[in-house]
């Protein structure tokens, strides 16, 4: 399999790989599983929210 990434995307992958101490393949596998989970929940009508613990401010992540 060949994966073509922009320089910025490759830097992001390198950064995540280093910060998480994972291989690039492992990072991409986790990202794919996360995306599958989010898509399944959104298809059921669920919302994806982030909440700041200290301020309790909430923000909804919209998928197009």
Image (cartoon, grey):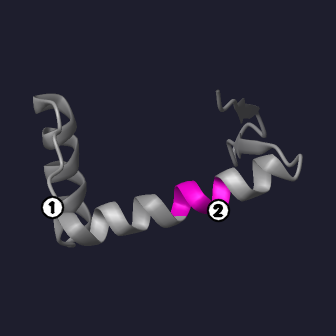
Instruction: Please report the bounds of the magenta region as a residue range.
Output: 34-38
**Residue drawn 15% across and 61% down?**
18
**Of 36 and 13, which appears nearest the observer?**
36
Mark identifier at residue 50? none
Q: Quadrant of residue 20?
A: bottom left
The tag earlier along the polypeptide, 2 or 1, is: 1
Give the answer, above or below, for where 64 lies relative to 11.
above
Q: Is residue 5 magenta?
A: no
Answer few, some or many: residues within 10 Å of disc 1's Cα (few below 14, many 20 plus, some between 14 and 19): few
Q: Quadrant of residue 19?
A: bottom left
**Of 50 and 64, which appears nearest the observer?**
64
Q: Quadrant of residue 61?
A: top right
Mark identifier at residue 18? 1
User: Foreground mark, 2 or 1?
Assistant: 2
| Mark pair 2, 1: CA separation | 24 Å
Residue that label 2 marks? 37
């Amino acid at each position: 399999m060949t994966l073509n990434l922009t320089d910025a995307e490759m830097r992001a992958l390198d950064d995540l790989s280093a910060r998480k101490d994972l291989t690039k393949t492992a990072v991409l596998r986790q990202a794919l599983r996360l995306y599958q989970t989010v898509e399944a929940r959104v298809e059921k009508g669920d919302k994806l929210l982030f909440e700041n613990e200290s301020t309790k401010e909430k923000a909804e992540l919209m998928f197009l």
